[in-house]
Amino acid sequence: MGNGIKAATGVAALLAVGLAGAAPAAAAPLDPTPMPPTEIAPFSESAPVLAPALVPTVKPASLAVLVDTRTMPAAIDGETECLAGAVYFESRSEPLDGQLAVAEVVINRAQSGRFPETLCGVVYQPYQFSFVRGGAMPPIRRESEQWRRAVAIAGIAREDLWDSSVADALFFHASRISPRWRLKRIAQVGNHIFYR
């Protein structure tokens, strides 16, 4: 209950200052009688100050800026690890939009109902990704900038923070090969061609 009184005192002091910025008037002493829990919401330091609709969202100038502002998490959950691994092994030398496109394919497959329902299930599905050997990924250079970018791209894709040019793609291959798929070609991004 002390936290609720603390919050109420802080709001009262702010209201007392007013718009003119004048010093607060002498306030009446607080009544130490506890209020019933139904009359005051508990104070939470993690609660947002403004309603989400009132907080403006600023879109970064570019995908590169968004990637650069992402910090490497202390721990990476399994699904993000699988998605970042796919980005790392399939497209780490590609432009960022190409890396995002690879991440989108993995996510789209998991959501399609035609492939496994998890990101790891999609990545480890037999004969889908050439880097997966014997049901495992090769070692990742986790201290590398390429891994940091792959993790950032995986997070951006999972949180849907940037629009991909291949948002509905389910398949891709390197442009150096020609598998003669009978699928709808969506776009070429970097050295990969994407299909639906």
Image (cartoon, grey):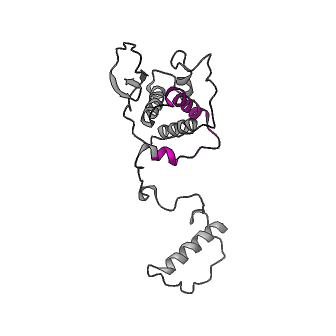
- Report x, y in % for residue 124: 57, 21
| Residue closer to the observer: 38 or 16 | 16
Q: Can the viewer see residue 175 in this picture?
A: yes
- Report x, y in % for residue 10: 57, 73
Q: Is residue 66 magenta?
A: yes
Magenta span main SS: helix
Q: Residue at x 44, y 82 (%)?
A: 20
26 displayed left or right of 192: right
Q: Is residue 85 above or below residue 68?
A: above
Q: Which of the 4 image quadrants contains residue 53?
A: bottom left
Q: Is residue 6 above or below residue 196?
A: below
Q: Residue at x 36, y 34 (%)?
A: 165
Q: Can the viewer see residue 35 in this picture?
A: no
- Report x, y in % for residue 127: 52, 15
Q: Is residue 163 magenta?
A: no
Q: Is residue 83 above or below residue 22?
A: above
Q: Which residues are magenta?
A: 65-94
134 displayed left or right of 94: right
| Residue closer to the observer: 40 or 64 | 64
Q: Residue at x 38, y 25 (%)?
A: 194
Q: Which of the 4 image quadrants contains residue 98?
A: top left
Q: Residue furthest bottom?
A: 26
Q: Residue at x 61, y 36 (%)?
A: 77
Assign the C terminus to one quadrant of the image: top left
| Residue closer to the observer: 1 or 82 | 82
- Report x, y in % for residue 44: 60, 60
Assign the N terminus to one quadrant of the image: bottom right
